[in-house]
Amino acid sequence: MHSEQPQPLTLYPLLLTGEEMIDRYTRPRMKAIWELKHKYEIWLEVELQACAAFERAGQVPRGTAEKIRKKAKINVDRIAEIELVTKHDVIAFLESLMDSVGPEHRFLHMGLTSSDIVDTSLAVQMTEALDLILDGVKGLLVALKKQALRHKRTVMVGRSHGIHGEPISFGLKMALWHEEVSRHVERLQQARSHIAVGKLSGAMGTFAHQGPKIEEYVCGKLGLACEPVSNQVVQRDRHAAYATALALLAATIEKIATEIRHLQRTEVLEAEEYFSEGQKGSSAMPHKRNPIISENLCGLARIVRANSLAAMENVALWHERDISHSSVERVIMPDSTILIDYMLARVTDLVDRLVVYPDRMKRNLELTGGLVYSQRLLLALVEKGAQRKESYEAVQRSAMASWRGAGGLHDLVAEDPFITKHLSTQEIAGCFDPKYYLRHVDDIFHRVFGKRGRKASTRLKRAGGR
C-alpha cells in the first residue's frame, strides 16, 4: 500500500484560534487517538491477534504471539526512515519490527494485505473518536436542558423571516435545540455500529490464504464486527455515513451559533456570549463585545461539511480498490473528529454561560405595539361567530394602520366598530396577554424531557434559577 509520508496531516493548528485554544477545548485523548504512535500500536495489535488466531489454527507455534508482544518495539522515527526507501507505510512498519522481534517476525502478516491492517485499525480509531464525541454530545444536552428549564417561561417574541411573529419562551427555543441534539445521539450511535467493522480477507477479499475464522477471531478481540463481504478494502459508504453524521452535528452547532449571533446584535441584544474579565472585542473600538465563539463555530462547520463531501467521493474506487481514498482520509477523519470534539466543548460552554436578558426580550416583544397578537384577535372574533374573511380584514385594517404609526394595535381595535361589536373591552384586553401563548409549555416540555422536566423546572425556580 503506497502512502504519503508518515506524518500527521491534521490541519487543526491552522484552522482554529491558536494552540492554546485547542489545548483548552480539545480533550488530549481525542488528539492522542490520531497520533502516529497510537495508530502503529493498533496495527501491531491487529498483527498480534492474527498471529494468535493462526496459533489456534495450528499454523503457528504456540506462544509465538506472546513472544512477539514482549519483544516488539514501535519506533516512529525508524518507520519513517524505512518508508523513505520503501514508499510503503505498512512494509516500513513491518520491517521496523524486525529490529526487535527477531526470528518470530516471519509469522507476522501471514496471508494478509495492507488494507487488512489499515482498515481494521482505522475502524478502531474511528470508534474511539466517536465514543468521545458521544460523550461531548451528552454534555451539550445537559447544558441545553438546564437553560431550557431555567427559561421555560421567559417570554420573548418568536420570529419568522426575521420578522416578529408571536410570543414564545426562550426555554422553548432551548428545548427545540435539545430535541435536535438528541436525534444526533441516535445518528452517531448508528454511525458507530456501521464503522466498527474490520476485514482480514486478504488481497482481493477471498480469504484465499487464510479462512474467515482468522478474521472472526481478530475482529472479536478488537470489539469489531466482520465485514460480511469485502474486496481489498472495507467499503467506503461506511466512512461516508460517519462523516455525514459528523457534518449533520456540525450543522446543528452552526444553527445554535447562528441564532446566538442574531440575538446578540445591538438592535436585538436578547442574549449574548459571556464576556470575561479583560476580554477585548476590537483592536480599534473599545466598546465592542463580539460573538466570536459563535462565529468561530459557524466557520468550522463549513470544514466538517466539506469533509463529508470528500468522504462521499471516496465511495467509488477502481475495481477491487485503489488508494485515492487513503490520502483524503488521513486528513478528513482526524480533522473532522478533532474539530467536532472542539466544537462540542465550545458550544457547550457557550450555552452554559450564555447571558440572557429577559427585560430586553419583553421590550422587543412590545416594539410593534401589540401587532404580534393579531392572530389571537382574529381567532377570538371567529369564536364569537364572526366570519373569518371579515374578521381578518378588520384586524389587518387596524394592524396596517398601526404599522403606519397611527397607534398601538390595542387602542386601534378598541375603536373598530366591527371588532367591538363582537368582543368586549375585557375580551380585547385578554387577547394581548403573552401568558396565553405559554399555556401548553408544560405539555411540550413533557414531550421533550418527560415527567422530570416539570419537577426539575420547579426545583430550579425554588433554588433561585433565572
Image: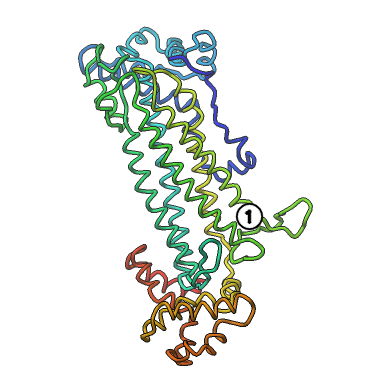
- State the residue at coordinates (51%, 63%): 160
Instruction: Name above or below for residue 68 compared with residue 388.
Output: above
Please tell me whether residue 424 is drawn above or below residue 135 in the rendered image.
below
Q: Is residue 284 above or below residue 155?
A: above
Q: Could you tell me residue 122's position as x and y percent?
A: 40, 28
Within-10-Å neighbours for mark 1: few <14, some 14–19, many 20+ = many
> Residue lying furthest right in this view?
284
In the rendering, at what x and y percent does residue 175 appear? 43, 62
Q: Which residue is at the front of the view, 100 or 435?
A: 435
Q: Name the image quarter holding the N terminus.
A: top left
Q: Is residue 451 left or right of residue 274?
A: left
Q: Secondary structure at mark 1?
A: loop
Q: Nearer the viewer, residue 298 or 276?
A: 298
Q: Which residue is mark 1?
A: 291
Viewer-closest of 21 and 115: 115
Please tell me which residue is depicted at 49% across the width and 23% down the height of the picture.
327
Along the horizontal axis of the image, is 235 left or right of 335?
left
